[in-house]
Image: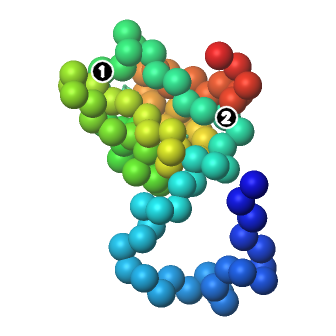
């Protein structure tokens, strides 16, 4: 099992020494709840995409929004901001 980072191994003050490596930090590991999209309710306004603090909402190949769970940290902002209640937050253990 990989060793988890600790205060002994992280950079002092979390300084970033290499530019452009934020994509390697998979914030989806933090998540206990995940967003699920009801495509019937979604009008593709893009509000969830604008408010998401991570690069976790993507435009998919069929012209709709989808989640990138590698980066979604489960904050629930997208669900709160969706004016059409198209996003629900569900516990990670649920199907
Ligand atoms: S905010 Fe809601 S309606 Fe708008 S694109 Fe996102 S999920 Fe769809
Ligand atoms: S739960 Fe948070 S991180 Fe995940 S897609 Fe919604 S706004 Fe983005």
Res 95 visible: yes
Which residue is at 37% across, 10% downward?
40
Res 45 visible: no
Which residue is at 43% across, 45% downward?
56
Assign a secondary structure to mark 2. Answer: strand
Whether residue 65 is situated above or below residue 7 in the rendered picture: above
Image mark for residue 43: 1
Q: Quadrant of residue 91?
A: top right
Which quadrant, please, contains the C terminus?
Answer: top right
- Marks 1/2: CA–CA distance: 23 Å
Cβ of mark 2 under 8 A from ligand 2: yes
Apparent side of residue 58 relative to residue 94 in the rendered image (left or right): left
Q: Which mark is in front, 1 or 2?
A: 2
Q: Percent from the top left, x then y, of residue 33?
A: 67, 34
Q: Percent from the top left, x then y, of residue 84?
A: 43, 21
Is residue 44 or residue 28 the one in the foreground? 28
Whether residue 55 is situated above or below residue 20 in the rendered picture: above
Which residue is at 42% across, 71% downward?
21
Image mark for residue 15: none
Which residue is at 22% across, 28% downward?
61
Q: Which residue is mark 2?
A: 33
Is residue 21 or residue 33 the one in the foreground? 21
Cβ of mark 1 under 8 A from ligand 1: yes
Whether residue 9 is situated above or below residue 68 in the rendered picture: below
Q: Quadrant of residue 6?
A: bottom right
């Amino acid at each position: 099992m990989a060793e988890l980072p600790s205060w002994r191994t992280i950079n002092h003050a979390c300084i970033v020494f290499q530019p452009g490596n934020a994509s390697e930090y998979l914030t989806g590991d933090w998540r206990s709840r995940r967003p699920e999209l009801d495509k019937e309710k979604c009008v593709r306004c893009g509000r969830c995409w604008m408010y998401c603090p991570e690069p976790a909402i993507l435009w998919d190949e069929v012209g709709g929004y989808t989640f990138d769970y590698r980066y979604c940290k489960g904050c629930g902002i997208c669900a709160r901001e969706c004016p059409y209640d198209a996003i629900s937050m569900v516990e990670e253990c649920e199907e």
